[in-house]
Amino acid sequence: MKRLAVLPLLLLLTLLLPVRNALADTNVAGSATPSASYTSPWESVAAINDGIDPPRSNDTTNPRWGTWPNTGTQWAELTWPSTQQLTSADIYFFDDNGGVRLPASWKLQYWNGSAYTDIAASYPVAVNAYNKASFAQVSTTRLRVVLVSGQASVGLLEVKAYAPGSGGGTSGWNPPASLVTPLNEVWQHVESTYPDLYGFRNYAWDQVMANGGSINYCVRWDTTATVTAAQRDQIHAALARQFKKWMDVMAGHNGWPYANVPVKVVGWAVRDRAQLQWSDSSVDIYVNDIRENAPQCAEPCGRFFNQSGNYPNCPGGASHHYDMSLWLTAGFGGGAGGDWGQRIGSEYYMSNLNADNIHILLHEMGHSFGLDDFYDWTPTGVCCFLMKAGSAAYITDFDKWMFRDWWRHLKSRYGY
C-alpha cells in the first residue's frame, strides 16, 4: 500500500532509543465532559479538552474558555463517566493582554463523592506554556481547576489530566463522545476504499510486531550533499523523536504491548561513498544501488521486498534488515508515505533537525500505519488535524483516536 500527500515541505530519520521501564502517563481529559462557573458568550468551555495544543497564551485562532467580564473566583471542570486515577495535570492559561489575564493564583480540586477537596501541589503561573501540577494519586470522577483573578478576568486554553500508564492496557476503546461519529465515518470510509485492508500485511503495525517492538530504517540520501558523523546522528535523533510521538499515543492503550518502540538506522544508501564523512561501522553503507532514480539499501535486506520476514540473502543477516526507508530528496517539495517508508525534502529535514514537530514527516508516518488522506472530505464535527494536510502541524486528539482505531481493528491478527 502506498499513499501520497502533497505538502509544501520535507523529511527525517532514525536512532536507537533506550527502553523505559515505566509506561508513559495517559492524558484522559479528552474523554471527560467540560463545564464551568461562567463562560463568555463568544467563548467555549469545550475548548479546555479539545486536544489542541495552544501556540501561545494569546491564541487568536483556536477556541478558548474565558470569563470576561466576571472576576473573582472562577472554575472549569472535567467530569468523567467512570472513576479515573489521576496523578498530574497540565494547565495552559488564556491571556489576551486585555480583559483576560493570568490568574493571581490557582489550584486543583477533586470530587471525593460528597464534596470538593483541595489537591496539595505546587501551582506555577506562567504565560505561553503548560503549567504542571503533580500530586499524590487521587481517585475521582471530577477534576476542577479553580482560578482566582488578578488584573482582569481569567481563562483557559487547554487542560490535560494524566492517569498512570498501564502495562496491561486496561484503557480500552473509550474515545470522547464528540469523536465517536467522525471516527466511525473514517473507519467506514477506510473499509470501503481499501478492499485489501485486512489482507494487507505490511503496515508499520505489522513491522513493529514482527520485530517484537522495534523498527529498522534505511536512509536513502537522494542528494549530492555531504553528511558528517554529527549530522548523521542528528538525523537519527530527529527521526526517532517523531516516530516516538506516534508510539506514545499507544503506550498503555487497549492491550498495546510496548512502552517504547526503539528506532534504529541500520543502513545508509548514497551514490558516492565520499558523501558520507565518517569511517566507523555503525551502519551498513550501500553505494550506487539505484532504484526509482535514487540510491537505496539492498533489496535482500528490505521488508518491502521480503514481506515474509525472512532475509536469507541480506549481508549480515536478519538483524541488518530494514523495515522502512527515510527517503530524503533534494528539492522535493512535498511528501509521500506508505509501507515502504517516508519521503520528504532533504533541505526541509535538515533545517528542522531540532524542531519539536516535523509535521510533514509525522503526516507521512501516519500513512505508513495506514491512516488516510482527507483531500476531498472532512469527518463530521472536526476541522483541523494532522492527517488533513495543511490543517495542523502536530498530532491532535482526533489523529490519536484514528491511530488507536487501527490498532482496535488489527490487534486480533497479532493475538491481542
Image: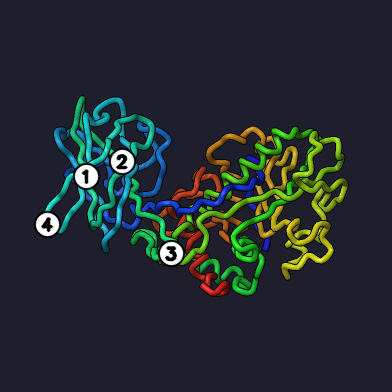
Q: Amino acid at mark 2?
A: Ala
Find residue 322 and report its image quarter: bottom right
CA gap between label 3 and label 4 equals 30 Å
Q: Amino acid at mark 4?
A: Ser
User: In the structure shown, which secondary structural element does the residue marked by tag 1 occupy?
Assistant: loop
Q: Residue at x 70, y 58 (%)?
A: 323
The local crowd at label 4, few if under 14, some if 14 to 19, many if 20 or more residues have their Cα within 10 Å, is few
Q: Is residue 223 left or right of residue 177?
A: right
Disc 1: which residue: 119
Q: Amino acid at mark 1?
A: Ile
Q: Quick one: SS at disc 2?
A: strand
Looking at the figure, which quarter contains the N terminus?
Answer: bottom right
Q: Earlier in the sequence, mark 3 or mark 2?
A: 2
Residue 86 horizontal/vertical position (percent): 30, 52
Query: Where in the figure is residue 381, as x and y percent of width and height?
Result: 39, 56
Which of the two discs, 4 and 1, sits closer to the camera? 1
Report the disc number at residue 133.
2
Residue 118 in the image, given as x and y percentages of width and height: 18, 44
Task: Determine whether, in the image, residue 295 is placed left or right of residue 15.
Answer: right
Residue 114: numbered disc: 4
Question: Could you classify mark 1 by the number of other residues whose Cα lies within 10 Å: few (under 14), some (14-19), or many (20 or more)?
Answer: some
Callout 3 crowding tier (Cα within 10 Å): few <14, some 14–19, many ≥20: some
Mark on residue 169? 3
Residue appearing at x 51%, y 65% in the figure: 407
- In whole angstroms, how far apart are the C-alphas of marks 4 and 1? 15 Å
Contact between labelled residues 4 and 3, with CB atoms less than 8 Å apart = no
> Looking at the image, can residue 225 be seen?
no
Decide which of 407, 189 is in the foreground and name it.
407
Q: Which mark is residue 349?
A: none
Say whether disc 4 or disc 1 marks the residue closer to the N-terminus. 4
404 above or below 108? below
